Amino acid sequence: TGGTGDTRDTGDTGIAGSGAAAGARQVSPEEEEVDKLLSKAQAAVIEAEKTVERIEDLPSARLPTGLGTLTKMAQPAFKVALLVAYCWAMHSFGLVVRLGGGLLLAGAVGLRGYRDLSLSPSGAIAAAVVGWSTLSSSFRAGLVLLGFFYVSSALTRFGDEDKDVEEGHKKGGQRNWVQVYSNGAVPAILATSAAVISAGKDLAILPVSSSPLYSVLTAAFLGYIACCAGDTWSSEIGQLSDSEPRLITTLRPVRKGTNGGVTLLGLLSSCLGGLFVGILFYITGGSYQSQWKVVPLGMGAGLLGSLVDSVVGATVQFTGYNRKTGKITGTRGPDVSPISGSPLLDNNGVNVLSATVTSAVTAAVAFALGCNGL
C-alpha cells in the first residue's frame, strides 16, 4: 500500500511539472506576428464599418427621390432658358446695353470654356473677342454661336479616352486662339456686317429681304457655322465608329485620325450637326413662314462642309503614322510613314478654306432660292 501511495505521489508531481512547463512556454515570433496582423485586421474592419455609416449619411448616397430627379433633369433646360432670356433682354434695349451685355456674356463663356478644358488661355481670350462681336450683333447670331460652341465642346469631351490617336491630343480639346479664330472670326465679321445693315434686327433671308446684301451675309453666316458644326460632329463622333475609315479620294482603308478619312457614322453626324444649326437658326429668327427652308439649307451645308474638308484634308494636308509613338501625325520625320496628302496646309488652314467655300455656296443657294420665290 505504501508503495502504491508513493507511485501516485510521483505521478501527481509529474503532471504538475508538465503544466508548469507548458505555462512557462514562450510565444514564437511567428505567433506574435500573426496576433498583430489579426489585431490590425480587426481594427480595419471596425474602421470600415464606421466609414460605411458615414457614407450612408451623405446626401449623395441617398436614393434619389422623384422631385430630386426632376430637378436634376430640369437644370439644363433652366440654364438654356436663362441664357435665352438674357440675350433677349440684352437686345431689347439700346446699343450700349447690347455691347455691355455682350461683353459680359462673352467673357463668361470664355472663362467657362477655360475651366472646362475646352479652351486654352489664348483660346478663351479669342472666344471672348469673337463672342462679343457676334453676341452683340443680333439675337439670332448670338444664340447660334452659343449653341454651336456648347454642343461641340460637349461632343469633344464625349468618349475622349478613345480619341487619343493623334500626336498633340489634349483632353477636352483645349482649342487655342488660332482654332477659335478659324471657326469664329469670319462668321463674326459676317454677323456684324449684317447687323449694320439691319440695325441689329433679325430679318428673313428667304425670300430675299429688302436688302439682298443682308440676305447674302446672313446666309453665309449660316453656312459657315453649319460647316464648322458638321465638321466637328463628324470628327468627334466619327472617331468612335467601329468601322474602319476610308480615304475619301481613293476609298482605301486608313487609320483613325487620318485627314480625309470618312465613315458612314461620321457623314451622318455631319448632317446632324448642320441640321442642329439650321433648326437653331430657324427658331431664333422670328415667325417667318418661309424661313423653314433654312433648316434643310443648314443640314446641306453641314454635309457639304464635311465633304469639302475631307477632300482638302486628303490632298493638301499631310498625314503620317509615327512608328515610335504609334500615333497619327501631321509632321514629316524619319520615323513617320506617309499615309496621304501634301504638307501645303495645316488643320486650321483646311478648316478656314472648307468653311469659306461652304459659306459662299450656301449664300449663293439661298440667294437663288430667294430670288425665285422658292
Image (cartoon, helix red, strand yellow):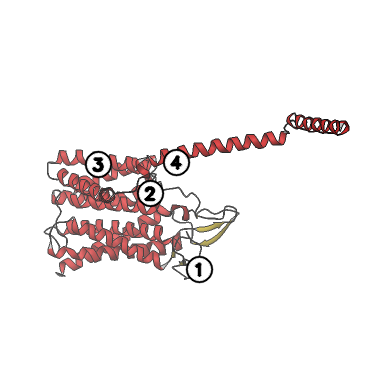
Per the image, the residue denoted by label 1 is: 253
Name the side, left or right, on which 108 lies relative to 160.
left
Which comes sooner in the sequence, label 4 or label 2? 4
Q: Residue at x 20, y 40 (%)?
A: 101
Q: Residue 247: where, in percent of width, then height?
A: 46, 67
Locate the C terminus by quadrant: bottom left
In front: label 2 or label 3 = 3
**Amino acid residing under circle 3:** Leu
**Amino acid residing under circle 4:** Val
**Foreground residue among 105 and 47:** 47
In front: label 2 or label 1 = 1
**Amino acid residing under circle 1:** Pro
> In whole angstroms, how far apart are the C-alphas of marks 3 and 1?
45 Å
In front: label 3 or label 4 = 4
Marks 4,1: beta carbons within 8 A: no
Name the side, left or right, on which 126 lies relative to 170.
left
Numbered badge on residue 105: 3
**Foreground residue among 154 and 122:** 154
Name the side, left or right, on which 207 lies relative to 312.
left
Marks 4,2: beta carbons within 8 A: no
As helix, strand or loop, the secondary structure at mark 4 comes to helix
Dot 4 alpha-carbon crowd within 10 angstroms: few under 14, some 14 to 19, many 20 or more: few
Per the image, the residue denoted by label 2 is: 179
Which comes sooner in the sequence, label 4 or label 1? 4
Which comes sooner in the sequence, label 3 or label 1? 3
Q: Residue 272: where, in percent of width, then height?
A: 31, 63
Per the image, the residue denoted by label 4 is: 52
